[in-house]
Amino acid sequence: MSEHFSPFSKEELMPKPEMLEIKKQKGELFIGIPKETCLEEKRVCLTPDAVAALTTHGHRVVVESEAGKLSNFEDVAYSNAGAKISYSTEDVFACNIILKIEPPSLKEIEMMNPQSVLISALQIKTQQKEYFEALANKRVTALAFDFIKDEHGLYPIVKSLSEIAGIASILVASELMSNRNNGNGLILGNITGVPPSEVVIFGAGTVGEFAARSALGLGASVKVFDNSLTKLRDLQHKLGQQIYTSTIQPKYVQKALMCCDIAIGAIRGKSRSPVVVTEEMVQQMKSGAIIVDVSIDRGGCFETSEVTTHSKPTFIKHEVIHYCVPNIPSQYARTATLSISNILTPYLLNIGEEGGIENAIRFDKSLQKGMYFYHGILTNKLVADWFNLPFRDINLLLF
């Protein structure tokens, strides 16, 4: 019998294991960056360098003309980075992904295409129910960058902006102390032979830490009050030196305020900031002393605080100068923009590498934390409870 020869080897005839994993296909992002229209908002989400990083990876970016002007980023810089400059707001909102600092207005939501992706701040305390209903009607997938929590359990953009606010609070107060601004004429520093200026800080979180760092760096004497001993202990460790710390007790608070030149409010409560300084305590402060209430966006922790603006930032009450601007980082728009851009860009590049937002949110828990709408379905329980809206768990929708 003749031997039969097969054109295939034994190895080729053996059954092969089934290939179940599908190779990820890199996706092209179509990003729109509109000009901010909210009062006194000067920041923009991405710098020209960040845009260049995105366009180099094959993504398309449309920037509305003068979107970066107030942060000192010109249109030509974005154009050189590979972005398309548009003079039409509608064209920008026609992109698949919209990047904004402030949440879009109802008019801006109307310009968005159905099934778009929105990445912006949420600012839940300033929103109305109609805002969420409009996003639901457009079936938008929305991420709040102030809700994004990284693998270390931190909110990277909130922390970064808090660092800016803490440093800025001391810089603002230092300028307000000058005679030109009706202050007491003291310099915030330690001059040989002159007693150092005294700074009281309420809150030992990120804002309080960076306010304390800045004040100590200038040579001021610093006292920090917080009801969390753990936070006070951590602050001492981070600063690397012993400073006066105390829990918030009226007797010690009043004594510290009577001697201080600057008081910084940096306490954040769950719903609103607790009032830890009464009007009577403010009345006993030195004439020309400065109050900078960084917590004003949550109601303020000084009883005498009232919301002010960047154009009219101060008022005087009981001979004490009050600075109560809610959006302090916007006054340092370029620094704030660089910070936000540096945090958002890796997320955007990763979304592109994963083939789009759908795949990215499946495997990136930090993006899941920031998501509050998935194709028009509300996925954030805090928002649902606050506005009495129906809610679905994001994990049940993704898997």
Image (cartoon, grey):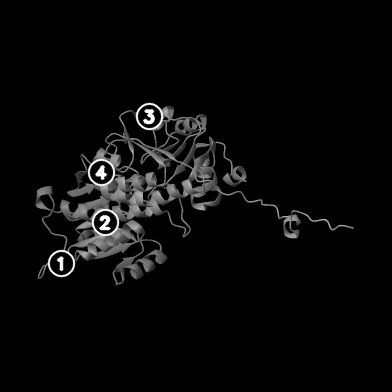
* Labels 2 and 1: the sequence-earlier one: 2
Q: Earlier in the sequence, mark 4 or mark 2?
A: 4
- Is 90 on the left-hand or right-hand side of 329? right
Q: Earlier in the sequence, mark 3 or mark 1?
A: 3
* 4 and 2 marks in contact (CB < 8 Å): no
Between tags 2 and 1, which lies in front?
A: 2
Instruction: Give the label, 4 or 3, closer to the camera.
Output: 3
Instruction: Using the image, tell me which numbered label, if any, was put on residue 324.
Output: none
Residue named by callout 2: 167
Q: Tell me how far mark 4 sits from mark 2, CA to CA.
A: 19 Å
Q: Are marks 4 and 3 in contact (CB under 8 Å)?
A: no
Q: Mark 1 points at which residue?
A: 190
Amino acid identity at mark 4:
Ser
- Residue tagged by mark 3? 91
Does 262 appear above or below 125? below
Q: Residue furthest front?
A: 2
**Residue depicted at 21% across the width and 39% down the height:** 311
Nearer the observer, 7 or 111: 7
Res 10 → quadrant: bottom right
Cα separation, mark 3 vs mark 1, equals 55 Å
Q: Which three-letter amino acid code belongs to the residue tagged 2? A: Ile
**Residue 180 seen in render:** yes
Sequence-first disc among 1 and 4: 4
User: Are the residues flagged by discs 1 and 4 in contact, CB closer than 8 Å?
Assistant: no
Q: What residue did someone put label 4 on?
A: 71
